[in-house]
Image: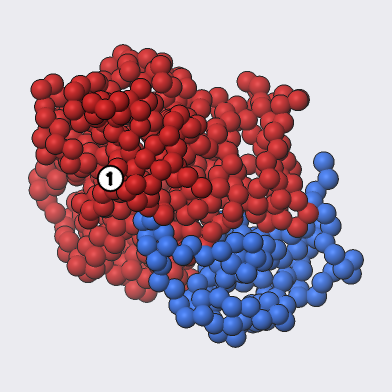
Amino acid sequence: MSERIPEHPILGVQKKGRVVSFTLDGKTLQGCEGEPIAAALKVNGVMVHRYTQKQHRPRGIFCAIGRCTDCVMIVDGVPNTRTCITPLREGMKIQTQYGVSAVPFDDGKPTAAPKK
Amino acid sequence: MQRFDLIVVGAGPAGLSAAIEAAEKGMRVIVFDENAKPGGQLFKQIHKFFGSKEHRARVRGFVIGQQLLEEADRAGVQVVLDATVIGLYQDKEIVVKIRDEIHHLKGDAILIATGASENMVPFDGWTLPGVMGAGAAQTLMNLHGVLPGKRVLMLGTGNVGLVVSFQLLQCGCEVVALADAAPAIGGYGVHAAKVARCGVPFYLSHTIREAEGTDHVTGVTIAKVDEHFQFIPGTEKHFDVDTICVAVGLSPMSQLLKMAGCSMVDDPKRGGQVPVCDEFGATSIPGIYCAGDVSGIEEASSAMIEGRMAGEAIARYLGYIPEADCKQAEKQLERGLFQLRRGMFAPGRKGTKQETTDEGIRLSQTLLTKGYVADDEIERFPGVTHRVGVHPVIECTQNIPCNPCQDVCPKHCISIGENITSLPTVVLDSTCINCGMCVAGCSGQAIFLIDEDKGDGTAEITVPYEFLPLPSEGDTGTALGRDGQPVCGASVVRVRRSSAFDKTNLLTISVPKEYAMKARFFKRCG
């Protein structure tokens, strides 16, 4: 889980957009309009953005500036959307990405952390 | 095809500075940046910058960013955002993707100021959600106001690792430890000391063995490494964490220069693949220039000067200013850059083992391995003196390019001299008026105002304090030593806030006088 910083000793209270609703895999969540989708998901405790195609391993926020593409998800039907640089808008439909699709893998669950 | 005098790629400190210089000389300039906002990484930098007045020392990075944007606006610099330059070709043609369109432009000169990207180091579990770049943590907390996690381990003790660790503490995260495979802390000692006095342990010659967790990070194991960076069995240490930050250096994003055919060189001292260029950023291809981290990893302060110098050079190259006119401006810029590149952390000294300061004083080894100067080491540094009444104690023990303490003291109690990397000294016969400007003005938070003997068996220590909640007068708690360990009971006798202090509040605590030279931080009861 994570949370918003209510007041920062240097930056004070940060200005955020109005609170809007969006869905993640059908479940309604809330975030601030205009903030990156990834930030809104972080506040909602969502760590896993996608599972990899071959080994079904989880991925989340890694670089947070649109460079690494680890955090991509399906946003309003578009796969491989970089959630760390895509602003959240009211009513967005966000889906966890499995490979490049929104359909969970046959094994139902992702594999465990890599074995040594 | 649209044509410009100068096309700048990257609207960070280097690119904007160059664009401003060029635009002010009458050139038609356009700046492209792939991000939604200009300013590069400056807006994530919330600490006060080092350097001297001309480098805007003592000003916080995000404020410098705002100033730079305003200056660019005034100069009429056109910045196009969400614009990724995807190609740089012969004859200075670029291809840029602006949202969903591809555009093709030509510049009489091109400046590449694309900056750098974070390095990574793979370990078991490194792809788990919860492992992120230190820059990612900085972006989440300082740009978006979201905590990257609750309990964090930082890998890397360069300035990025140290600064981001402190920023994590500032927004209320717990930093369980900093680890680094190197045997000595890589960043400024003063940055390490800020973190250490909060009680965060440093593990040098340690790196991550494994990030634990199934779907996301739930813990981390670090272990000691030998001189060949091999794990030593039996030295493992486990921490429960939800976040692991990786700060293991930056690499220049020099791909466009390589694509254009500029001569490149692998230079570890500059951070990797960098263009061959002169001091003005001119590459091997006439008309293609570079500035900032793309030409070698340094600080934002040097990137801004490099940008200015490149802007001057491009104006000269295109004939916008006569040769003679730029000599003086260039000299001044070169001098500013030269100052920043001196001292123990100078690019030329990277990787060399240093035993003493430029003054010949033995360096604190505890500072290099644990992040703080030990009680029995601190007295040998020239900023640490004893006298009757309130006086500054300057715990600045490495030669870094920084001198605001010398400028802010209205009574000239502190001297650094001409060379901005010299250690600060306390001026003999000067009279401290306890104004606190030095405590708040020191970018490294390394100055304390101390009255060693109040006459009633107590001493008073004024410390910089950039955390919330701010303690109040009368609060009681524990004084922590430089190592972050409790040394004695303490009470807050004065809290000072002022716009002149720029968010660095001053906390004056009272302690038994025998702890005057030990107590350096305050933790409230409960």
The residue depicted at 11 percent of the width and 27 percent of the height is B430
Q: Position of residue B207 (x, y in %)?
A: 64, 34
Image position of B523 (left or right of A28): left
User: In the picture shown, does residue B246 fall above or below B236?
Assistant: below
| In the foreground, B405 or B308 | B405
Image position of B425 (left or right of B471): left
**Residue furthest front as drawn:** B456
Residue B416: quadrant of the picture: top left
User: In the picture shown, does residue B193 fall above or below B255?
Assistant: above
Q: Quadrant of the N terminus of chain B?
A: bottom left
| Colour used to depict chain B in the structure image | red
Look at the image and tell me whether residue B182 can be seen: yes
The residue depicted at 28 percent of the width and 55 percent of the height is B64
**Mark 1 lies on residue:** B494
User: Mark 1, residues whose alpha carbon is within 10 Å: few (<14), some, or many (≥20)?
Assistant: some
Chain whose colour in the figure is blue: A
| In the foreground, B189 or B510 | B510
